[in-house]
Amino acid sequence: MATVVNMSGFGFSCLSQPVRGVRRGPVIVRAEAEGVSIINPSIRKSEEKVVDSVVIAELFKPLTAYCRCWRSGTFPLCDGSHVKHNKATGDNVGPLLLKKQKE
């Protein structure tokens, strides 16, 4: 039987199969704000989509997008699931982009 664990009071919950105190198998993480699926309740709401970029000197790829909507099928990498989420909820969450510094 799956259990729901509230994480840090931020509305994150975790479903897992506890086995003698040790979690094994997949862990499902959901982000909800008091029953509402909006992930970004107050940050830069005037923007259509909140996307932040960080430039880093030592990266293998020139650009990597990390998920911040918790909906990605390739989590922690972004697969664009935030687009569907934003349309369904009116939210404006977008990915975190890590960009390789140009030499």
Image: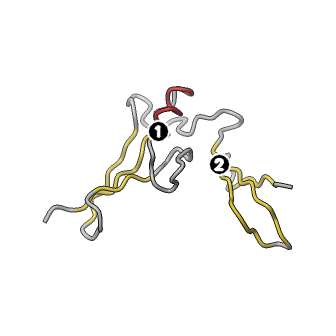
Question: What is the distance, in whole Å, between disc 1 and disc 2 at their CAs?
Answer: 16 Å
* Percent of width and height locating residue 40: 52, 38
Q: Nearer the viewer, residue 72 or 9?
A: 72
- Circle 1 packing at 10 Å, graded few (<14), some (14-19), many (20+), is many
Task: Give the amino acid type for the residue marked by disc 1 in the picture.
Answer: Val
Q: Nearer the viewer, residue 9 or 94?
A: 94
Quarter of image, res 80:
top left
Q: Are marks 1 and 2 in contact (CB under 8 Å)?
A: no
4 with respect to 40 (left or right): right
Task: Give the amino acid type for the residue marked by disc 2 in the picture.
Answer: Phe
Residue drawn 53% across and 33% down? 85
75 with respect to 50 (left or right): right
Residue drawn 40% across and 39% down? 50
Quarter of image, res 63:
bottom left
Q: Which dot, 1 or 2, sits closer to the camera?
A: 1
From the image, tell me which residue sits under label 2. Answer: 10
Vertical arrangement, residue 80 with respect to residue 3, above or below: above
Of the residues under marks 1 and 2, which one precedes in the sequence?
Answer: 2
Query: How has the structure been colored for display?
Result: secondary structure
Quadrant in the picture for the C terminus: bottom left
Quadrant in the picture for the N terminus: bottom right
4 with respect to 58 (left or right): right
* Percent of width and height locating residue 41: 55, 35
- Circle 2 packing at 10 Å, graded few (<14), some (14-19), many (20+), is few
Label 1 residue SS: strand
Q: Nearer the viewer, residue 91 or 79?
A: 79
From the image, tell me which residue sits under label 1. Answer: 93
Q: Nearer the viewer, residue 40 or 69?
A: 69
* Percent of width and height locating residue 26: 68, 60
- Residue 71 is tagged as none
14 with respect to 67 (left or right): right
Label 2 residue SS: loop
